[in-house]
RNA sequence: GGCCCCAUCGUCUAGCGGUCUAGGACAUCACCCUCUCAAGGUGGAGGCACGGGUUCGAACCCCGUUGGGGCUGCCA
């Protein structure tokens, strides 16, 4: 495994080591699709290069983090198949590391304590012509840890921080524009830029692939890496995912939870395939790829620079393709839980067998698994319920419905064998007899027997429903029609 | 406001100075197939934000404009 690399140049690191990447989410809400894509890109690189993928939970903000979100992240990653080689490490269990680093920085005068409140700073810096942000007020006050203040990093000015981003190329920041940012809160809790960097050094991270929103943090990270004397990883900032209004996907505003998509019946490989294509595309311009193919072809240097809209329509299409490619066995296994959650489902071997034999007809008609129950419902639901307006429009409002149903009933009773072929022959014959297209003939029949206007092919459906139930439903419909006309 | 990033069909993208009268995919429209609905097939409409350069030649390079986004927290 050591040193084994795929075909792209991304496996090379500045140092003569092998790749170590990390995914470092903060457990402050449902795990969302943007995070999933970032995690996947990291994972693809690690797998391609034979490197290590580390999962690190950035939970230093006790106020905002909840343990259940950690589980949510791990579950979602597992579902997607994004496996981690190390971790999950929790920053909340590594606090002494950050405290040591902070002390070191303070002792070496790379950082200083500051007791200014936000209001005090604002009062000094807000106004026309003044630069907002911290003004360095306590920089030379020589306050100590006992001051009860926050620890601020002493940004070296003048100076500039430049680096070559794996996605964007060279980026330059003037240190002049960076305020002395806080490393440790006055309550002793480390902040992102400290804990993040300390861990990246401690864990030997060689490549940091994260969302573009972190780009402005990077010069700060750089300075902390340098102050701490740690090896600086290569950075790559991938564009954010946006909603239809082109704003960064937000947990509060947008529907983004991976868990939701899983529940709805999206398949993990479809999700990964779609996610990978948001910002990246393979050399040969193919869209459908297995995870293995993506591992082989992914190249961080080839990721686009502009934000992408997370288009559920296209995701749906991808999912439909993946579903249609499922084996009958897999499709049955994936579908069963969705059917089992319905009140009309009775879990018997016979029903399972019927379900299994009817499922191939459903497979090509759906894009997500949660659509399965509605398609097979007519086969199992007893008594049958009608979708809104179906009884009224298709049965009661159709002047020919009664006559058609009467004749169909007779036809069924006269069948030598209750089979698909005989059913078809009989109905086609009736359509000739009535001088109406088969689709017109089957409309009231479908409504009467399935309670729906559209659905799986009718002949097969009637066979699955069974002769007795079919006749009974036709009788019910005939009665309903008679009732409405009396 | 300041700093940074970005800019090819509605959307995701291919394109990395001539092969572009710009290719593919989703969505959309039409037609075909068809027992409904899908799926599938064929075809159509639809784009290089704008203005300057550089060059024999620019979607591709440079500058500006405009537009969008991110950050600007004792969040990450």
Image (cartoon, rainbow, N blue to C red):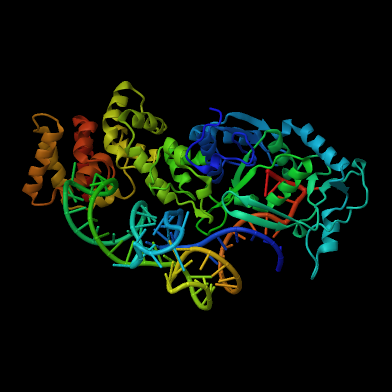
Left/right of residue A140 with respect to residue A379 in the rendered view: right
Left/right of residue A123 with respect to residue B20 in the rendered view: right
Asked if A304 appears above or below A350 in the picture, the reply is below
- Residue A333 percent across, percent down from the top left: 37, 28
Residue A61 appearing in the image:
no
- Residue A7 percent across, percent down from the top left: 47, 39
Q: Nearer the viewer, residue A329 or A40?
A: A40
Q: Quadrant of residue A191?
A: top right
Tell me what residue is drawn at x 50 percent, y 49 percent.
A302
Tell me what residue is drawn at x 65 percent, y 36 percent.
A57
Residue A225 appearing in the image:
yes
Q: Quadrant of residue A13?
A: top right
Task: Count every numbered label the image shows and give the total.
Answer: 0
Left/right of residue A293 with respect to residue A419 in the rendered view: right
- Residue A55 percent across, percent down from the top left: 61, 34
Q: Quadrant of residue A27?
A: top right
Tell me what residue is drawn at x 51 percent, y 35 percent.
A5
Tell me what residue is drawn at x 70 percent, y 57 percent.
A173
- Residue A31 percent across, percent down from the top left: 57, 40
């Amino acid at each position: 495994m050591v040193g084994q690399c795929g075909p792209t140049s991304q496996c090379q690191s500045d140092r003569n080591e092998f790749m170590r990447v990390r995914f470092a989410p903060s457990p402050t809400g449902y795990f969302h699709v943007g995070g999933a894509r970032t995690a996947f890109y990291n994972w693809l690189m690690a797998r391609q290069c034979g490197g290590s993928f580390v999962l690190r939970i950035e939970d230093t903000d006790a106020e905002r983090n909840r343990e259940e979100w950690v589980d949510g992240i791990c579950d979602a990653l597992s579902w997607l198949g994004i496996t981690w080689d190390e971790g999950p490490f929790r920053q909340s269990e590594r606090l002494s590391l950050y405290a040591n680093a902070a002390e070191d920085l303070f002792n070496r005068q790379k950082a200083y304590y500051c007791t200014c409140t936000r209001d005090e700073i604002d009062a000094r810096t807000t106004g026309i012509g003044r630069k907002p942000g911290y003004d360095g007020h306590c920089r030379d006050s020589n306050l100590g840890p006992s001051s009860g203040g926050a620890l601020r990093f002493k940004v070296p000015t003048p100076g500039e921080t430049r680096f070559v981003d794996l996605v964007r190329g060279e980026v330059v920041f003037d240190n002049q524009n960076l305020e002395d940012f806080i490393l440790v809160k006055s309550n002793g809790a480390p902040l992102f830029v400290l804990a993040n960097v300390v861990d990246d050094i401690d864990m030997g991270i060689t490549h940091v692939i994260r969302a573009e929103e972190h780009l402005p943090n990077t010069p700060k990270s750089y300075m902390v890496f340098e102050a701490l004397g740690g090896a600086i990883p290569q950075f790559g900032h991938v564009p954010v995912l946006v909603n239809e209004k082109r704003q960064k996907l937000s947990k509060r505003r947008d529907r983004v939870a991976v868990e939701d998509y899983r529940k709805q019946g999206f398949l993990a490989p479809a999700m990964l395939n779609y996610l990978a294509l948001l910002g990246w595309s393979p050399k040969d311009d193919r869209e459908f790829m297995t995870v293995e193919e993506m591992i082989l072809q992914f190249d961080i240097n080839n990721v686009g620079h502009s934000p992408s809209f997370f288009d559920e329509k296209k995701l749906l299409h991808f999912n439909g393709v993946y579903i249609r490619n499922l084996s009958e066995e897999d499709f049955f296994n994936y579908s069963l839980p969705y059917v089992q959650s319905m009140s009309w489902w009775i879990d018997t071997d016979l029903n399972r067998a019927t379900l299994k034999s009817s499922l191939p007809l459903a497979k090509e008609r759906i894009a997500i698994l949660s659509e399965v129950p509605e398609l097979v419902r007519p086969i199992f639901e007893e008594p049958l319920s009608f979708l809104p307006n179906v009884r009224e429009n298709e049965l009661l409002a159709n002047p020919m419905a009664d006559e058609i149903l009467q004749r169909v009933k007779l036809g069924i009773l006269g069948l030598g064998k209750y089979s698909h072929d005989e059913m078809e022959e009989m109905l086609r014959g009736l359509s000739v007899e009535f001088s109406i297209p088969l689709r017109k003939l089957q409309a009231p029949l479908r409504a009467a027997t399935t309670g729906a206007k559209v659905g799986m092919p009718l002949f097969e459906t009637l066979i699955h429903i069974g002769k007795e139930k079919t006749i009974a439903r036709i009788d019910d419909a005939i009665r309903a029609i008679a009732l409405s006309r009396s």
